[in-house]
Every structure is written in structure tokens, then in C-alpha cells.
Image (cartoon, rainbow, N blue to C red):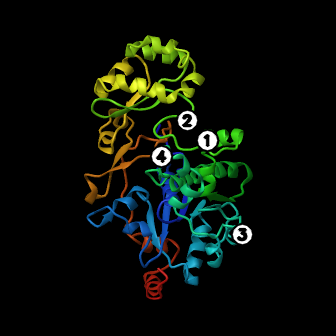
Amino acid sequence: MTQTKPLSGIKVLDLTRVLSGPYCAQMLFDMGAEVLKIENPAWGDDARLFQPYVENRSLYFEFVNGGKKSLTLNLKKPKAAEILKSLIADADVLVENFRPGIMKKFGLDYESVKKINPRLIYASISGFGQTGPDALKPAYDILTQARGGIMSLTGYPEGEPVLIGVSFSDMIAGVFAMTAITTALYQREKTNEGQQIDISMLDCQISLLESSMMRYQKTKVAPKPVGCRHPTEAPFQSFDASDRPFVVAAIGDATFTRFCEILGCPEVSSDPKFNSTAARHENLDELGALLQKIFITKTAAEWVQLLQENSIPVSLIQDLDEVCHDPQVKARHMLIKSEAPELSDIELMATPIKMTSLPEQTSRPAAPLLGQDTIDVLHGLGMNDQQIEELKKEGVV
């Protein structure tokens, strides 16, 4: 029996731009939903202009919009809002990431549209949420990383705060939004009612501060960055081999004892300065210096092979070229082909969700050209070619 994807039959209206919302809607598509992307007819999603390009296609845009349909609507025009309301009547989910208040100006806020479709799941993603004194402030990933504390924890002691190397706040907001949407769809099965979802990039980041926040709550002293090591466990850090750095996570007393035996320094594990987690943490610098003298004597590949053979957690610090050729990444099909003919040599990041009802991804349909499905969608609403041409002349679509 052929399995259907988990969200097969779910219709999503994607009114989002750039990253947080499009990433959420991309995951919904990958789970089987039909996603209609609503874009401004003048230029569309800003991400269409983001580098790098291949054959005039933005790879940034491609990565979070594959397989969606594209309808252009100028929501500043009342006729465009009416068209969207017609689509809302038959939709399951609407996702938007406008600044709070903008959708209300269009007459498309949740309180208005739930009268059209009480079963609609209406997800709003913003920098600071729909409520609070700063709800209307503009937000970008770098701002929420800075304000949410994660930059203060990233980097090396005595160094400057460091931005995480990916748009962490944007993407984690997309993940939480997708989680909330699927949860709301499940609840709708019981209540037959939709609801509004309010996702804040700042909120999402705060929720992930884990041990750093817990340590602050105990001491009331803000933790500082510790570089490429764990703040409480040791050895759980990077070391330099003779050719390149790698990381080791030999935590727990039994693992540390075995680790020292493999390295040829069994006496270290019985030294009172290192014979417990607390002692190793107290003497981190001394332990790190001692181990560094040993690790510099072999290549990283030699250490990785030796430690892996003895079940000690270890890894090279891989660049993206190595990631793309990693056999585990390949085995998990985490890099997939784009079906856009111009992008035959390009691989995209796949969804990390593996389910028995979800066929293994090997490719993703191309992202839509701006407005490529506008005529078909409007025909589906009962409009004829003459009416559509008038809407184009009026700047509605």
C-alpha cells in the first residue's frame, strides 16, 4: 500500500518573506502540504534578490521555497485582499511574518479572517511577538541573537561576542512555528476550530539557552563565553593535532579513565586533580595543556581512528566541503537535488524529519518563478482571462 505524506491534503497560504516563515512553509511542503506563496507583484519575496545566483535563480530563495506555487497579490489594493479572502475560505493554514499590525491594515488579521474560516490555523512569526512594549520594533537575526543573550555566550574568553554562523534565530522560529502549526492541526481534529499562533524569534531563542540560563539562575552571575569547550564537562573541547583541529567528548569518570589509557597516560585519570568531573572542571586549563602536548604528536585522522575504535566520542571539525562528502550525511540523504533544470549541479538541504509515512527525499521541486501560478489560481476562483487582465492593469496581481 502506498503511503501518503503526513500533511497530504493540507492547504497552506504562505505570506512570508526571506527566511523564518519560508523555512516553516518549506517544511510543511516537505511533509506533504500544498503551499501557495503570496508575493508582491513588483518584486516578490526579497530573498529572490539574495546571492548566490545560478542562471538568475537565487539559491537562497530556492533553499526555502522549493515546490511551492506562486501567486502575486498587491495587498494594498482592496481587490487583492478580497482575492486572498476567497483563498482563505478554503485554506487550512495561513503563515505570515509581517510586522505586527500590518495584516490588520489589510483587513486580514486573525479576528477578521476567522469569520471567513473558523477552522483556519493562522500563524504569525515576528521578531518580538504580537504583544509587549517592543512588538512593533523591526528585527533581524543579528538583533535577536544580540538581545537574546546567545552572542554573549559565543566566542572565546576575553574576546568579542560572536554571531552564530547561520541565521539561528530566524530558522529556529521557523521550526517552532511548524511545530505549533502541526500541533494546532491535531487539536483541530478534536475541536473543529482553528486558532492563532504567535511565534517570536526572541522567545524561541530564550527557550534554548539551556544550561547557561540555569547556571545564571543559580549564581545570578551572567556566564561568559568559553570558546570551543563545554562550560562544565572535561575533556569536552577542541584540540590541535599535528595538522588540524578536532574535538573530543570524553566525559564521565569511566570514559575518562579509558581515554587516558588509550592515550598512554593512565596516571592522569587517578591524579586527584583530574579523577572526578568536578576536579577536571576545576583544573580545566591544566588538563587541556597536558592533553594538547599528547595530541600534537599525531594527525587528527590518526586520533579520530584510534579513539573511534575505542568508542570515545570524537570528530574532525569539518568544513562544508567535507560535510557534503561525509558518508553519514549521504546515507541519510541530507543533501538532495533540485529539480530546477538550471540547478542540475546544486544540492539542497533536505528535511531532517524521518518518518515511516514520509518517503525518503531524493530531490525537491523547483522554487516557483514570480507569479507563475497566478492565472491558474485565479481561474480556480472562477475568473476569466478578461477579468485577470483587468486585475493586472490595475496592479492588483
User: Of callouts 2 and 4, which one flags the residue occurring earlier in the amino acid sequence?
Assistant: 4
User: Of callouts 2 and 1, which one flags the residue occurring earlier in the amino acid sequence?
Assistant: 1
Say which of marks 2 and 3 sits in front. Answer: 2
User: Of callouts 3 and 4, which one flags the residue occurring earlier in the amino acid sequence?
Assistant: 3
Q: CA distance from mark 2 to mark 3?
A: 46 Å
Label number found at residue 155: 4
What crowding class fits label 2: few (fewer than 14 Cα within 10 Å), some (14-19), or many (20 or more)?
some
Report the label total. Answer: 4
Instruction: Answer yes or no: is residue 347 visible.
Output: yes
Label number found at residue 241: none
Q: Quadrant of residue 123?
A: bottom right
Q: CA distance from mark 2 to mark 4?
A: 12 Å
Kind of residue indicated by mark 2:
Pro
What crowding class fits label 1: few (fewer than 14 Cα within 10 Å), some (14-19), or many (20 or more)?
some
Q: CA distance from mark 1 to mark 4?
A: 14 Å
Residue 307, image x and y in percent?
38, 20
Kind of residue indicated by mark 3:
Glu
Q: Which residue is mark 1?
A: 212
- Residue found farthest to the right: 191
Kind of residue indicated by mark 4:
Gly
User: Of callouts 1 and 3, which one flags the residue occurring earlier in the amino acid sequence?
Assistant: 3
Secondary element at tag 2? loop
Secondary element at tag 4? loop
Q: Which residue is mark 2?
A: 231
Kind of residue indicated by mark 1:
Ser
Secondary element at tag 1? helix
Q: Which residue is mark 3?
A: 111
Q: CA distance from mark 3 to mark 4?
A: 44 Å
